[in-house]
Image (spheres, helix red, strand yellow):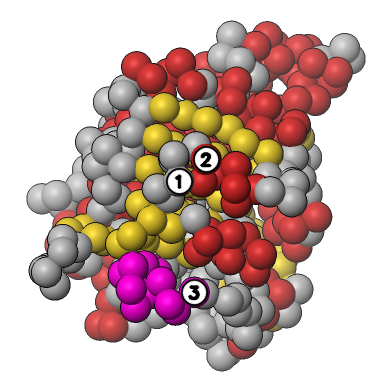
Amino acid sequence: MKTKAVRLYGVNDLRLEEFELPPIADDEILAHIISDSICMSTYKAAIQGAAHKRVPNDVAENPVIVGHEFCGEIVEVGKKWSHKFKPGQRFSIQPAINYQGKLDAPGYSYRYIGGAATYIVIPNEVMEMDCLLDFRASAFFYGSLSEPMSCIVGGYHAHYHTKAGSYVHEMGIREGGNLAILAGAGPMGIGAIDYAIHCDRRPSLLVVTDIDDVRLARVSSILTPEEAAKNGVKLVYLNTKCDDAVDQLMALTGGKGYDDVIVFAPVASVVEQGDAILAKDGCLDFFAGPTDPKFSAKFNFYNVHYASTHIVGTSGGNTDDMIESLEMMADGKINPSAMITHVGGLDAVVETTLNLPKIPGGKKLIYTNISMPLTPIADFAKLGESDPMFRELASIVAKTNGLWNGEAEKYLLAHAKQIS
């Protein structure tokens, strides 16, 4: 079977190509990809090429398919897995398969599996590691967002606290405590707010900061203080572009500080701000992945010694985290669609990936079987003045406060130009 896919050949060398997939073996699965969202990690792989830890050294001769936040339908199942998977079954995938302790992952390391493709061959190790996951949600894009959401879920689970006189770590954020999400008005921050409000281990106070009033206004219109209050959480949005930001943050806690702080920007001053507002036994989660291997920031070690403050970091979720995010989406507990600000087709992947840091907004969602430039959802109405497809899409997303949704996905897949 032929597939169209974006493949990485080396540094800044991404190519959209059509080629033949090999017939599946008895322990493999043929699948049809519907959606894939573009991650900054893919940009990092593209600009590093073979120097990236997950990209093979021979990528120039054996290019790999990029994209690891994908969702689709199973087409054909090899004999080994026919008892567990069926044609027509929808799936999502956990790319961090950790097979035999290796870093190889779909979207980085394989010739025939990656999200930026129409059809793929799923290798045996994905199923062996239980990383091919059943998907019940109504729209495919939720499956694509389950991977970034799993990173958020994993971050929350990595927090820990102790009781005085005990060395036992109680995992997770402090229930009923104070939580600060710093630089939290971006796409991953939005997912973290949604999870904090709707998970089973919630803070009593949640403060979300940013230095841009426009971003804060958008997030606060989507995840409102009123919605948080329904779940027992006092939600405060705060612009910290001021000299007394630490004082303002501390005042919101009555001077106690924050039991948990999550930092969503690899900026030293933000890390140090997080350190300054930690309460006794406070846990700082450095969530943001820096590109500079020498990135560092100051940390108050007096408080480490006398106040038991500590730091954690995660670089992805595990399979259990992904299953949790999929179940919460299927049950309507979280709605990560607020992460998405742009939509495009497979022919938009190369340019979008190579320029990702320069493109404002949140997640860039790709539907791999259509041809469409990367388009901001906010531009649908203007484009609709001359294009009936965008006019209808603008009308559909208007029903959900400008957010991408299942009805919009269904309409786009039915009316967009197919990739050729």
Foreground residue among 112 and 51: 51
Q: Nearer the viewer, residue 2 or 210?
A: 210
The kind of secondary structure element at disc 3 is: loop
Residue 187: percent from the left, percent from the top?
A: 58, 43
For disc 1, the marked residue is 255
Look at the picture and state if 259 lies above or below 114. Answer: above
Report the residue marked by disc 3.
300
Q: Could you tell me which residue is drawn at 53 percent across and 61 percent down?
A: 276
Q: Relative to residue 303, is residue 74 depicted above or below?
A: above
Amino acid residing under circle 1: Gly
- Kindly tell me whether residue 54 is visible in this rendering: yes
- The disc label shown at residue 251, or none: 2
Q: Position of residue 324 (x, y in %)?
A: 26, 43
Relative placement, left or right, of 296 versus 140 is: right
What is the magenta range? 300-312
Q: Residue at x 38, y 43 (%)?
A: 178
Front residue of 263 and 78 = 263
What residue is drawn where x is 24% and y is 42%?
175
Distance between the Cα atoms at labels 3 and 2?
Answer: 20 Å
